[in-house]
Amino acid sequence: MGALRLEAVRPRVLAPVNLTLEAGELVFICGPSGSGKSLLLRAVADLDPHAGEVWLGTEARSTMAPARWRQRVGLLPAEAFWWADAVGEHFPAAARREQDVDERVAPRSADRGHDDLLATLGFAPDVLDWSVARLSTGERQRLALARLLAQGPEALLLDEATANLDPSNRERVELVVETYRVAAAAAILWVSHDPEQRERLGGRQFGIRDGRLGQTEAATADPARLEDGR
Amino acid sequence: MSLVLLTPFDLALAAVLVLLLAAMSWYLHLGVERRLLIAAARSTVQLMLVGLVLKALFAQTNPWLIGLMALFMLAVAGIEVLQRQKRRFRGPWGYGIGAFSMFISSFSVLFLTLTLIIRVEPWYQPQYLIPLLGMLLGNTMSGAAIALDTLTRGAWDARGRIEARLLAGGTWDQAIASLRRDSLRAGLIPIVNAMATAGLVSLPGMMTGQILAGSPPMEAAKYQLLMMFVISAGTGLGSVAAVWLGSRRLFDERERLRLDRLRDQGRDRGQ
């Protein structure tokens, strides 16, 4: 896993952003709504046209197939969308395989890590058979995170990952994200409106003011990392 | 049995029926009498002109003039496809995708039909080419228009789901696959339905025409079958081409969904 480096990334409403997240580093972004936080994450995931380059470790985004990039730098949008009927259909084939095999022949031990992840988020393994239409907003949000982590991203972009959750589920999500960050040494860029959450989890914090991204608390980090682009 | 020639007086009698309808609309305050009369006048002028043009074309069998006529028909069909889109592509693509798809499908199917199936000599004999092209274009036009409209509207509405597939590491191809299937299906339904009910309710227009012109019904039925088969091939090919080009155009080289390439609804010129 490697560092995530944004080089003059320029979403529609922001001045160019230069920002480096070390492998396994957690960085928070906050700012008023409409200030461009989500657009910045979308730009990093390469969903919108924009100028700039992003590096994952030593690999430049422009040298990688877009699908591969989005799989390795996983974005969790504020609103999770589901394209099929059953929850399990949205998970990568490897995580789903145990479902397809006859259970009497192959006991459910093939993918323990996956079941553990679902359990930590408060779901039984049979959630994969559930219909998406039955899910509540909060369940959708938690399962969207499980779905994202199942694709094994090397860096994470989280957009309001806990916005619709009650306190106990919020803790579950934070625990899962923190565990993943440490275990996979994944750089995490997290857009969050919750000051207590930012306090709780630590890490550098950036805010967006007047179309510019700037560090709001110089507590832990090296200010030289953020060079203003304009 | 021979062709009964219509005199201007015969047509005038039929036109009186339209006038009566217009009078009824005026009397009952239906408010359509004006549009009805204008439409009737338009069709009179258009059909008379086409009759004259075809008469001249048939007399000469000049391949360049026939080509010009074919291109004119294609151009009008292209405009029609464009106008049936709720969300069309910006710039030349809006017109180009529909017109190009109809061009490759209708013209290739037409050429095969004329050279391999009907085998007229020369193959561009306008008496066959122009009516066949008209029927092919008319149906391909509906197919391509419905398919493209389903595609662009669907992409607009399903943006979140399409991008979710991209974010899950899917290619543009996988992200649009189900919508592409739906669009193709929608484009093909009219011709499939037409084939399924052909002859049960109404006789198809071409068969009717041939019977009125004195052909034996069995011969007319055979021609109609031939046309239905080649029309479904042309419509299928045209819809596939339009949907493929359209879905490719919805994504850029970095496989991003580019809805900004579609015009906003109801606004004529974007941005």
Image (spheres, rainbow, N blue to C red):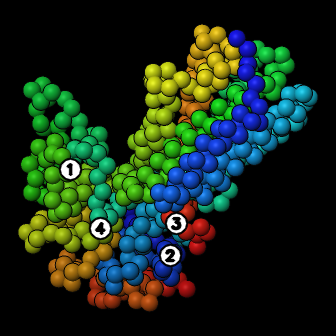
Please report, as a chain letter, where disc 2 is located: A
> Of residues B56 and A90, which is closer to you in this image?
B56
Mark 2 or 3: in front is 3
How many angstroms separate mark 2 from mark 1 (CA)? 33 Å
Mark 1 element type: helix
Above or below, B8 against A13 in this view is above
Mark 4 element type: loop
How many angstroms separate mark 2 from mark 3 (CA)? 25 Å
How many angstroms separate mark 3 from mark 1 (CA)? 34 Å
Which residue does the numbered mark 2 point to in the structure image? Answer: A12
| Callouts 1 and 4 in the same chain | yes
Above or below, A173 against A18 in this view is above
Mark seen at residue A132:
1
Please report, as a chain letter, where disc 3 is located: B
At 50% from the left and 26% from the top, the residue drawn is B202
Mark 2 element type: loop
Coordinates of residue B62 in the picture (x, y in percent) = 90, 30
At 70% from the left and 11% from the top, the residue drawn is B1
| Callouts 2 and 1 in the same chain | yes
Residue B33: quadrant of the picture: bottom right
Whether residues under marks 2 and 3 lie with C-beta atoms below 8 angstroms apart, the answer is no
- Nearer the N terminus, badge 1 or badge 4? 4
Crowd band around label 3 with a 10 angstrom C-alpha radius: few (<14), some (14–19), many (20+)? few
Please report, as a chain letter, where disc 1 is located: A
Q: Which residue type does callout 1 highlight?
A: Val
| Callouts 2 and 4 in the same chain | yes
